[in-house]
Amino acid sequence: MTQSIRWIGDNGSGFPAVQPSRDLSFLRFLFRYPIFLLVFGPPIFRPLDAYSGVDTSQAHFDFWSIFQVGWIVSIATWSILRLAYSRSILIPKQVRSILKYAFFLGLVFVVSVTYSPGRAVSSELSIVYFLNLFCVVGFIVDVYWNPPNWMDCLFHFRLILFVLFGLVLAALVIEPGLVLFIIPGAGIRLLGGAIAPMSGVPAPIAIMSAYCFLHSLESRVRSALSFLAGVIGVLLTQARGVEISLFIVLAILVFGWGKTSKRAAYILISAFMASVLLAGAVVAIAGGDRIWRIFNRNQDTAEILTASGRTGVWMSVIKYSLTNPQGMGYIAGIRKTRRPEYGSNLHASLYKVGGTDNSYFEVLADAGWLALGLYLTIMIKILVLGRRLERRQTLMGTSGVNATTLTALRRAILLLVFCLLEGMDGSDFVIPLRQEFYLQNVIIAVILGVSTSMLIALRPQPNALSK
């Protein structure tokens, strides 16, 4: 089994020493790197209509909300204690820069509390934002001295998603109302509810499994079955945004794989030509109009062009932000403002909480143009950092960095690209206490952790220079 680099001390040189470490079992892995527990959400067994008639811009307390907050507080406290007792380190400046922008974004959210229509909700979620940031920083510091096998790390990540997928299927049998939603004229959608949102669980499974299949990182039978399970999960959601985002990421993955060798390029070209012929045959047999109706869930043209009513909300947010550049107040503002309009909207029926159904417009509505600029800067810097390290290491070969580390970085970047694409169709990726929010931030933590390990390994050794 592939082994990773383990940093166990500085040997008096100012750089961690390198020693191979064995892979950890699933439970030991979660105990060693508790940030991955955030991916669980945690699961909440609450009906989809639990918020019907509730003004979610104001504070509400029940067992599940206390459980949610307790979950993140416990993991963040664990991370803070580790930070307090860890030895001082020098995080690479590229990673520090990203963390600083994330910290400033949190401060902007805190300032927005002063003009929020639901100050309690905005304050609580601002605290949760910083707790999550502490978890990310704690993970980076942790892996500085003792990084995991990065490939094994992503395999455990996929296993967590499979566990969540299994919980959804179990709920489908025991209590379908927890995970299913019936849309008149469009059929039944497997949404996953608060147990595991299917907009963020099956697609990453499919992406990671496809990568493993193409690059022979595990049994191809296992990869193929896992990929098939992920794709079926995405199709059951009947969510066009998830389907399109998954298709784009898989296209990036396949074309990237096609560049690895002439054989891969020939296979890619042959598969592309075969798929074109197959698609033509399917259209000829089934009919283009019928396929179009199935893809668009029998919606009329007006609904399709307005993205099921989303564009009206987005234009309203832009119009408001032009005269109020500070935004509406973190999370609570858009919920309070949009909630009356969501009374007759499909997405109100799904979530009962208001919002924008777009991560970027959500941030804009929360704290204005400054917050949106900071958020975009953070995401762009993460992608640029990961891409530069990937290209640099590809040109240099794997000298100084374990080959599995580079592979893990590529997979994590693909997962983040999916989150950013799907963020155009859903706002949960930027709303604390939502599983998609944790999923995206854990992926970011992995990218920053891998980048830290690679940047440290690529530093010139003082002792080596003096010889």
Image (cartoon, grey):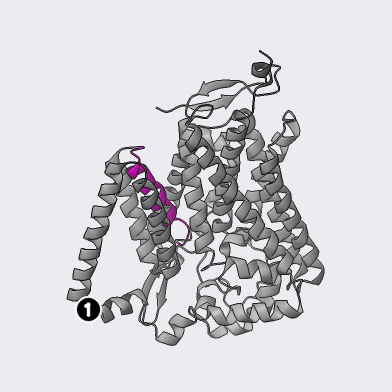
- Seen at 61% across and 61% down, the residue is 430
Whether 239 is drawn above or below 96: the answer is below
Residue 215 is a magenta residue:
yes
Q: Quadrant of the N terminus?
A: top left
Taking depth in this image into account, of 383 and 10 the one nearest to the observer is: 383
Which amino acid type is shown beneath numbered disc 1? Gly
Q: Could one spot residue 26 in this view of the protein?
A: no
Q: Could one spot residue 242 in this view of the protein?
A: yes
Residue 141 is a magenta residue:
no
Question: Which corner quadrant of the image does residue 115 belong to?
Answer: bottom right
Whether 292 is drawn above or below 16: the answer is below
The secondary structure that most of the magenta stretch takes on is helix
Position of 457 with respect to 409 (left or right) is right
Total marks in image: 1
Whether 400 is drawn above or below 303: the answer is above
Taking depth in this image into account, of 73 and 116 the one nearest to the observer is: 116
Q: Secondary structure at mark 1?
A: loop
Taking depth in this image into account, of 438 and 62 the one nearest to the observer is: 438
Q: Quadrant of the C terminus?
A: top right
Residue 384 spot, x, y in % from top left: 58, 49
Whether 229 is drawn above or below 28: the answer is below
Residue 55 spot, x, y in % from top left: 66, 75
Residue 338 spot, x, y in % from top left: 64, 79
Residue under label 1, please give it. 287
Q: Which segment is the magenta one?
A: 199-217
Position of 68 with respect to 20 (left or right) is right
- Seen at 71% across and 76% down, the residue is 321
